[in-house]
Amino acid sequence: MKVCVLLLVPVLLSWVESRSPYQAVLQHSRIRGRAQGPNVCAMQQRKGTDKKYFTNCKQWYHRKICGEPTVISYECCPGYEKIPGEKGCPAALPLVNIYNTLGVVGASTTQMYSERAELRPEIEGPGSFTFFAPSNEAWAALPTELLDALVSNVNIELLNALHYHMVDRRLTSEELKHGASFPSMYQDLHVHIHHYSNGVVTVNCARLIKPDQHATNGIVHVVDRVITAISNTVNTLLEVDDDLETLRTAMAAAGLSTMLEGEGQYTVFAPTNEAFDKIPKETLNRILGDPVALRDLLNYHILKHMQCAESIVSGTPMETLQGSVLEVGCEGDQMTLNGRAVVTKRDQLGTNGVVHYISELLIPDSAKVLLELAEGSAVATATQLFVEAGLTPHLTGSEPLTMLAPLDAAFTGSDTTMTPDMRTLMTNHLLRTQLSSKSLYHGQELETLGGVKLRVFVYRNNLCIENACIAAHDKMGRYATMFTVGKVLTPPMGTVMDVLKADDRFSVLVGAVQTAGLTELLNQQGALTFFAPTNEAFGALPPPDRSRLLRDPQQLSSVLRLHLGEGLLVSGGVSSHTRVKPLQGERLELGVRNYTVYVNRVPVAAADLMATNGVVHAVNTIIKPMHDLFRKVLSSHSSRAMKQ
């Protein structure tokens, strides 16, 4: 991608600022095609279709449009033609009237119908017109009965249809601004222009496939479909279709019908009656009976701007009226929402927007209860445990809560049998208030449904509640919030000394702490991080050294104080080159490799044993000061050098 940017910057830096997105993409296509000769544009065609696009930077490198591979072709840029025997497209197309221009730009069917409708004298004569001319393929795609209706009735309908494709002035692609509309030559009914940031330009949602074909009496833009006159608002479109009866009723109940009658540019992803029927009755009735949830639900189906289907060439996040984002994309010929091909009918145009029919109801997080938030996430094990623990009333009710939901991987190797202790643990994964992670601060205390107080720790690289660090964005529900966390929560159980006494791995350490006179320190209020040597760590010392150390209170105190850090640091707060100030000594150097925390190069065997006044991390090796480690490394290097 950098290559693309570097290539374009010198050429386009000042040029693009004043040119339209279409012109910027056209210029990129010219740059990509210049090796083929003058005035050659690189085109990308989706394999198996006749759809071609001037290539922008992203498409050129990804070689995909709507998820499908593309074939590069080289064609004359608009306004130029080949000369036999010469490279590229050196000749400018001769300027002729609009009627003759139609014949040379792939719109010969439009030319034929213009003659049949007796429009030819008008588009051959004086004047200045813009003709949005359907391609030959566009006419061929019309249903037979519709085409028959157009060309009958003494050709009046056909003439009206063609006049609707015309504007009584010359409009280049530069002047086809996003959101503009122009009175057509059929009863001044407007045609609606949308000029998208990816360079696609549409008129009434038909894509301009050959823009800016100049003529002596105007300009021709070839489009990929026959457009029809529109006079109804988006709300009227919803009102006249029986397939949208449930949506219409919901819109009226939420007070949104008036909005869709007024001015603006909206995109409505309209769920059909069938889409509503797929939702469990209990869920649907809850939302329909809750004005706040209903409004959020419906606004989640409405974009703040008009988005035609033909403008989509890849997935793009788009903000809804509800405030969150929909991923609007495409796969082949299918328009997608959040990666799913649920759009069944596209580009139903109104004067103030467009409607796309969808076969599934989109429920935003803000309209969901806790259980629904959890069911749509990677926390299936935790969700099952909450249910087994009898907490469903809390997960489906209206009380303000925050769920700490561990990822499924957090339970790997754990016994998830429902016991009284497990029930208590899951109860302590529910906080008594609805929170946003953005409102959390270091040292904050949060109360669980089980009455336990949990602490918040803010680190440079993580935000944690006790040992459980937040692993994904918040899911803000109707009444409650879900925090996805990377570990099963360990509520604090007594002081650091209590934690050591309760764990058989630290029986030698408990005696050592008492000998060193540190019992009071490990019981008093505060925030300590103890890299606690296990029995295995003491057992690894030579017996004479171990015996001498355990009998010497002063030396024992010095060694243990090196293992005690100031402040409370859980494993999730450790990043590369994290430093902790020990109670004695210069520093402790921490890092993470392969999900294991290391302190002064010693791996932590068991992390995050939470205490009310700190945290215990078990180590199976006595930690050495960093300067001792450096001295050992230097000694090793020196020894090897002498041998050489």
Image (cartoon, rainbow, N blue to C red):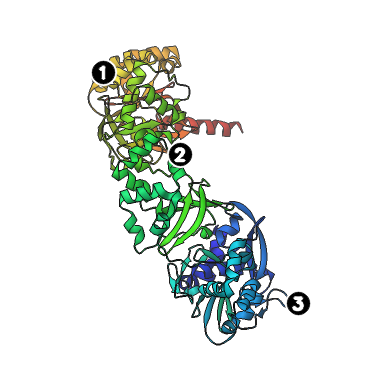
Residue at 41% across, 49% down: 245
Using the rendered image of the protein, determine whether residue 142 is visible from the camera's viewpoint. no
Q: CA distance from mark 2 to mark 3?
A: 62 Å
Q: Tell me, for residue 84, which label it has, or none.
A: 3
Q: CA distance from mark 2 to mark 1?
A: 63 Å
Q: How many residues crowd mark 3 within 10 Å: few (<14), some (14–19), many (20+)?
A: few
The residue wearing badge 2 is 278
The mark closer to the camera, 1 or 3, is: 3
Residue at 72% across, 74% down: 87
- The amino acid at mark 2 is Lys
Where is residue 603, by image quadrant? top left
Answer left or right for 571 relative to 38: left
Residue 328: image x %, image y %? 48, 52
Q: Tell me, for residue 64, which label it has, or none.
A: none
Where is residue 120, by image quadrant? bottom right
Nearer the observer, 526 or 343: 343
Q: Tell me, for residue 519, which label it has, or none.
A: 1
Residue 564: image x %, image y %? 32, 27
